[in-house]
Image (tube, rainbow, N blue to C red):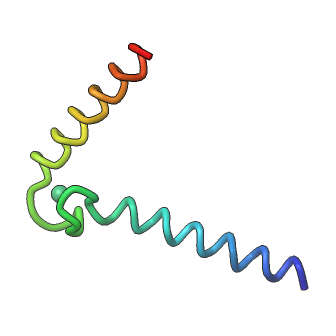
Amino acid sequence: MTTLRRTVRLRHGQMAALDLNTICEKCAKSRAHGNHDKCSKQRQAEGIARRAREQQQ
Ligand SMILES: [Zn+2]
């Protein structure tokens, strides 16, 4: 019984990860549609800023 519950939890986690990959978190649209150049540039800039902040601390 416990093994069955574990399998369900695993599947749910995999689905959540898949959603993050297919849907752009910047414009909340599917990455397969539209142009996400600005989104990726914004994400890159945020990543660089976050890394700089972490290095200062
Ligand atoms: Zn986007």
Q: Which residue lies at the image location 49% right of the left edge and 68% below the top edge?
A: 16
* Residue sitting farthest toward the right: 1
Q: How many labels does the image show?
A: 0
Q: Which residue lies at the image location 59% right of the left edge and 68% below the top edge?
A: 13
Q: In this view, does 16 lie to the left or right of 56?
A: right
* Residue sitting farthest toward the top: 56
Q: Which residue lies at the image location 70% right of the left edge and 80% below the top edge?
A: 8
Residue 12: x and y, percent?
59, 75
* Residue sitting farthest toward the front: 57
Which image quarter is the C terminus in? top left
Residue 55: x and y, percent?
41, 15
Tell me which corner region of the image, top left, top right, bottom left or bottom right, holds residue 40: top left
Q: Is residue 11 left or right of residue 20?
A: right
Residue 10: x and y, percent?
68, 70
* Residue sitting farthest toward the bottom: 1
Front in this rendered view, residue 7 or 52: 52
Q: Which residue lies at the image location 28% right of the left edge and 26% below the top edge?
A: 48
Which image quarter is the N terminus in? bottom right
Tell me which corner region of the image, top left, top right, bottom left or bottom right, holds residue 50: top left
Q: Is residue 45 left or right of residue 11?
A: left
Front in this rendered view, residue 19 or 54: 54
The quadrant of the picture showing ligand 1 is bottom left
